Amino acid sequence: MQEFFYDEVAQKWLLSHQKGGLLDTFFYTGIKKVIIVFGVFILFLYLYSFKDSVNTLKEYRIGLLIVWLSMVMIPLIIGGLKSVSNVPCPCDFEHFGGEYPYIRVLDVMPKEIVKKFKCYPAGHASGGFALMSLFFLFKEQKKRFIALGIAVAIGWSMGVYKMLIGDHYMSHTVITMMLSWVSVLIIRKTMQRHSFTN
């Protein structure tokens, strides 16, 4: 799959990451800032729901907490895995213009390679996939699946951008999406078992 995103003749990726550029603003720095602001807003709504005069938000309290915890925990979990997985990015490999031989996720790193890699799973997309927790915020099934669809689209737009600049394989993004959803389910189960919302 990654072959489609790399031009061997020109020896460059389909897209180049330029800080401050339009694509960087839209798919990288900009979207990260929007997600952070959204997370702060969710936390505000959760805390505001404890005000006696507010009745509307009370029924959404557990959902708000699930969303906020997911937005905090999932990037931390994926970031932690990235820091210990020691897996190179596609752009690091000789085949794609890098300087290292092809190394898979479970391969033993050759002793002569001292550099520590942090490319697996896909950390950037984890912020978008954490929004899958919005599924548990809404009561109506239709709204739940709309929210889930939007979250998956955001996560994949972030993941595909990183694939197009040579930072990730598709498998990196798939694993991130799966780990994010499992994390959301664990957070939800934990919130249901303990009285954190009363």
Image (tube, rainbow, N blue to C red):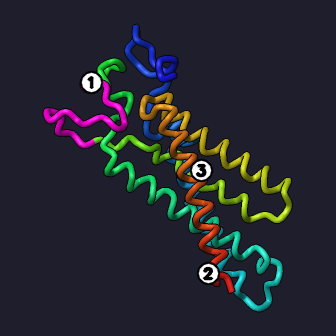
Q: Is residue 112 magenta?
A: yes
Horizontally, is 83 left or right of 135 in the view? left
Report which residue position mark 1 lands on: 101
Q: Which of the marked residues, 1 or 2, is nearer the chain's N terminus?
A: 1
Which residue is depicted at the point 79% across and 63% down?
138
Instruction: From the viewer's side, name the closer residue of 190 and 124.
Output: 190
Instruction: Name the mark nearer the viewer: 2 or 3.
Output: 2
Residue at (71, 76) in percent of width and height: 61
- Write down the residue under mark 3: 129
Please name whichever residue, 30 or 93, is drawn nearer the observer in this view of the structure.
93
Label 2, residues with CA under 10 Å away: few <14, some 14-19, many ≥20: few
Residue located at (57% from left, 47% from top)? 178
Q: How many marks?
A: 3
Residue stretch rendered in magenta on the structure = 99-116
Lower sequence index among marks 2 and 3: 3
Quarter of the figure with the C terminus: bottom right
Kindly identify the amino acid type of the residue bearing the numbered disc 1.
Answer: Pro
Tell me the distance, in whole angstroms, between the alpha carbons under discs 3 and 1.
31 Å
Using the image, tell me which numbered label, if any, was put on residue 194. Answer: 2
Type of the residue with mark 3? Phe
Residue 154, x across and y down, in percent: 64, 44
* 92 to 72, vertically: above or below: above
Residue flagged by tag 2: what amino acid is it? His
Q: Position of residue 123 (x, y in %)?
A: 46, 48
Q: Alpha-carbon distance for marks 1 and 2?
A: 49 Å
> Is 5 placed above or below 25 here?
above
Position above or below: 16 against 6 = below
**Quarter occupied by residue 69:** bottom right
Q: Secondary structure at mark 1?
A: loop
